[in-house]
Amino acid sequence: MLNQYNLKMPKNVFAGPEAMQNLKTIIKDGVAKITIFTGKDILKLGLLNELISIIENNHIEYEILSDIPSEPSYTQAQEVVDKFKALNSDFIIGVGGGSVMDIAKLASVLSTGDYTVKDLLDNPLLAKKQVTSLMIPTTAGTGSEATPNSIVGVPEKNLKVGIVNGELIADHVILDSSMIKNLPKSIAAATGIDALAHAIECFTSKKANPISDTFALEALDLILNNIIEACSNPDALEAKRNMLLGSFYGGVAITCSGTTAVHALSYPLGGKYHIAHGVSNAILLTPVMKFNEPVIKDLLAKAYDRVAKEPNKELTVDEKSKYIIDLLENIVTTLEIPTSLKAFNVPEEDLEGLVEAGMQVQRLLVNNMREVTPEDARKIYLEIM
Ligand SMILES: NC(=O)c1ccc[n+]([C@@H]2O[C@H](COP(=O)([O-])OP(=O)(O)OC[C@H]3O[C@@H](n4cnc5c(N)ncnc54)[C@H](O)[C@@H]3O)[C@@H](O)[C@H]2O)c1
Ligand SMILES: [Zn+2]
């Protein structure tokens, strides 16, 4: 556990039923022109209707950039940012999953053109906030609405890389469950497991601290007790609201602590095979937690005490820890997310490349309580092949 820790968060977070209506308050003072970043699916589903009618009723000019690709590479991110720069907006709204929000956040520090996305990959400290931003997540989720991270693909390294700087943190956030009401089950499941991974990794991270634990444990409680219902029942609005809160808290936990080997080993799966971020985390979640178990049992037992609805006081630390790992495994299976790379035709001869790429993600591997050697990474990848 760290001795010193620092909490950075968006200034203004609105949540709860009808939260979108708070947009009026956010934009009422001096916003001249808004750029809305979103994806084609989100636009088609009508998820922007309420937002646009509020903007129009306030007589504010706006443009929509709706061609943001899923899990963008840094060059794709730069293309969107270049379009944004030409629009001369003074307010950014990102409405989407992590892919959209990550680019909208990058745009908020890239409007003057003094440096590029590639420059930020080389030196994230260059980032300076230039345009005020509001993030509205439509998945629950990456927690990107809370974090100082923007993740982009770097094809030449077969990796996804995080650009991390507090300047990227959104100024405003709206968590409105109507945004995730009709999320298809497979997307709700994968993105929900991503949020779950953030919570459990941050809680068991070397960077964990009392502040991040508060958010990580609450996130775990909300997600473990709502994920199945939220993914399976479109009308389970309370479960969905809890998932949105849980994923936001997971993002706060990332900011204050850090994810570990699940996310580290997952980056090459996204970078090389374009497996969705939540799915690659789901595949790795149980194997990595089992690998870590010898050194995180006490923490998993604490998690059990917090999340179990009818805790069994007779259980030993070992039994509580096993309960949590079994629960993670059951959730992934129940939600019918792939549990191995077989579904993605990854050939066994790629194993060494995966090990090499995974071991490059030292930014996160150093947070893992149990040291991960190349031999350990090889065993974990082999297990999921
Ligand atoms: N910045 C961070 O802190 C952070 C954390 C974790 C992951 N990420 C990054 O976020 C990206 C993944 O984001 P994601 O998992 O949210 O997925 P996503 O944004 O890529 O969206 C996945 C799919 O869901 C669709 N979609 C989104 N919302 C929808 C809705 N409400 N209804 C119907 N369809 C909808 C999208 O159009 C897309 O096809 C990755 O690039 C990942 O690396 C960032
Ligand atoms: Zn993640």
Image (cartoon, rainbow, N blue to C red):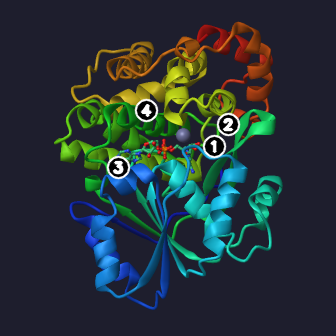
* Above or below 365: residue 290: above
| Residue at left offset 32%, top offset 19% | 334
- Check disc 2 and report the residue beneath it: 367
Whichever of labels 1 and 4 marks the residue nearer the N terminus, that label is 4
Does dot 2 land on a helix, a strand or a loop?
loop
Is residue 167 visible in the rendered image? The answer is no
The reply to whether callout 2 and callout 1 are in contact (CB within 8 Å) is yes
Q: Nearer the viewer, mark 2 or mark 3?
A: 3
Front one among 380 and 253: 380
- Check disc 3 and report the residue beneath it: 244
| Residue at left offset 31%, top offset 48% | 180
The reply to whether callout 1 and callout 4 are in contact (CB within 8 Å) is no
- Mark 2 C-beta to ligand 2 under 8 Å: no
- Mark 4 C-beta to ligand 1 under 8 Å: yes
* Above or below 245: residue 202: above
| Residue at left offset 32%, top offset 33% | 185
Q: Nearer the viewer, mark 4 or mark 2?
A: 4
Quadrant holding the N terminus: top right
**Spatial CA span between label 2 and label 3:** 25 Å
| Residue at left offset 54%, top offset 44% | 70
- Check disc 1 and report the residue beneath it: 207
Residue 201 placement (x, y as % from top left): 54, 34
Image quarter of residue 369: top right
Mark 3: which amino acid?
A: Leu
Whichever of labels 4 and 2 marks the residue nearer the N terminus, that label is 4
- Check disc 4 and report the residue beneath it: 190
Whichever of labels 2 and 1 marks the residue nearer the N terminus, that label is 1
Is residue 309 visible in the rendered image? The answer is yes
The reply to whether callout 3 and callout 4 are in contact (CB within 8 Å) is no
Left or right placement of residue 158 versus residue 295 in this view: right
